[in-house]
Image (cartoon, rainbow, N blue to C red):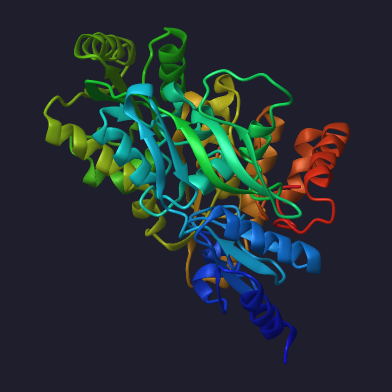
Amino acid sequence: MSAVASVERDLRAAVAADVVAPSSSYLTDMTEARGLHGRADAVALPRTAEEVGQVVAWCYERGVAIVPRGGGTGYAGGSVPLDGGVVLSLERLDHVRSFDPLLWRMEVEAGLRTAEVRRVAREGGLLFAPDPGAAEQSQIGGNIATNAGGPHAYKYGVTGAWVLGLEVVVPPGDLVRFGGPVRKDVAGYDLKHLLVGSEGTLGVITSAWLRLTPAPEAAWPVVGFFDGVRAGAAAIERVVGSGLPAAALEYLDSETMRYAGPTFPGEVPAGAFAVLAEADGSHDEAARVRAELLEVLGEDALALYAPEAPQEIAAVWRWRDGLALVVDAQRGGKASEDIAVPLDRLGEAIEASLEAGKRVGIPAASWGHAGDGNLHTTFLLAGDDERELALAPQLSEALFDIALRLGGTISGEHGVGFVKRNWLERQLGPRAFELHTAIKRAFDPVNLLNPGKKA
């Protein structure tokens, strides 16, 4: 019997969780288009945190790698098993353990889909603000493990800002809790936030206490169109500098608008760079912020679009949510990363990233979370051209280089995973990287949790 079959057979006999042969759906994530496809010996499908602990303990005792997996929507290869081992899928841990709307909190299991977390909060008149892409597929445990962001992170913060406590299985299979249903806790080191963004390399998140906030009464988008990158970047800086509490502050360069402009629910000036902001809060507060956004963006805008009807407002965000699919479909392939830079270097970073494509003859489009300095520059590759597809790693590395040269980071919200692991030491520097690695060893001394990722 092969070693692969032996792992599957022996694990199935030893644990209560279901164990199945690995299928292709558990071996890839959104990096599949760039050729990243993994290999595993088995897939474990636990239903409880205790079953997760059994799987981790069995693997740790036998030296078998463990790759935690959420919805598989990542862009850095974080949930792809690189060289065998057990994929530990959290999809069946999908319960709301408690919901306390009067206390503005809930406890949910790691496999609950992000859109469902938001729906439960909304039905209680509350808001769980993090809104990363693919919310219908992504799971809250994966969002916490990557510290995912989204358009509304500008005002409300990334996922980690909403985590009160975590239940985690750590090597060699122990179930522990960091934090809990409390608003303040400074006892001991902040181990909770070590797990946030750890990408499954320190422990397996099984549930989380999340804080909530009252849902805003009103939310109105305002879109300004500008003559080029520099004018658009200056408008973004004006919004930030004015102190306006915009809920979201996005940008879309002229190439992005060339592809996506025809489906925008309003008129778009030819060749314009777009800035999308949102005003929210009580009705009066949202109205005030909306008026001030119109004033600040209108100083040198080519045009403004500020819908008020609910269906028109919804159409703007449907358009924004579908943006990546529209751009990605243009040539059938892409290379895209999520670098972030200081806000005052945003315009420079956009221009440099587009120039990186021009140097090798590849068209590019850039959009992202402007208020956070977070770029999602995308190089449009011909899906049937091997020469162009082979340029993907080079183009990604050009973006990483731009980010570090401008004092930024190789990842604003997607994580490091496998794709960016060789750049982490360059960003952190030798001593900081040494401390980073020491934390990994303290949690996972024999490197079985998601090996080859993050650290």
- Residue ID at (20%, 9%): 284
Residue 118 placement: quadrant: top left
Residue 279 visible to an observer of this rendering:
yes
Residue 438 or residue 94, whichever sits in front: 94
Residue pictured at 55% horizontal, 30% vertical: 180
Vertical order, 266 against 231 (above or below)? below
| Image mark count | 0
Does 234 sit above or below residue 22? above
Query: Measured from the top left, where is residue 133 in percent x and y?
Result: 41, 45
Residue 373 at least partly seen: no
Vertical relation: 108 (above or below) 224: below
The residue that appears at 13% across and 31% down in the rendered structure is 310
Question: Can you give x and y, in whole percent of width and height, for residue 31 in the image?
Answer: 55, 60
Say which of 122 and 400 sits in front.
122
Q: Quadrant of residue 308?
A: top left
- How far across and how far down the image is residue 147, in percent? 56, 38
- The percent position of residue 55, horizontal first and vertical second, equals 65, 64
Q: Is residue 154 left or right of residue 78?
A: left
Q: In front here: 219 or 22?
A: 22
Residue farthest bottom in this picture: 1
Query: Based on the displayed image, in which of its 4 quarters is residue 315 positioned?
Result: top left
Q: Is residue 58 left or right of residue 264?
A: right
Tell me the quadrant of the picture where the N terminus can be found.
Answer: bottom right
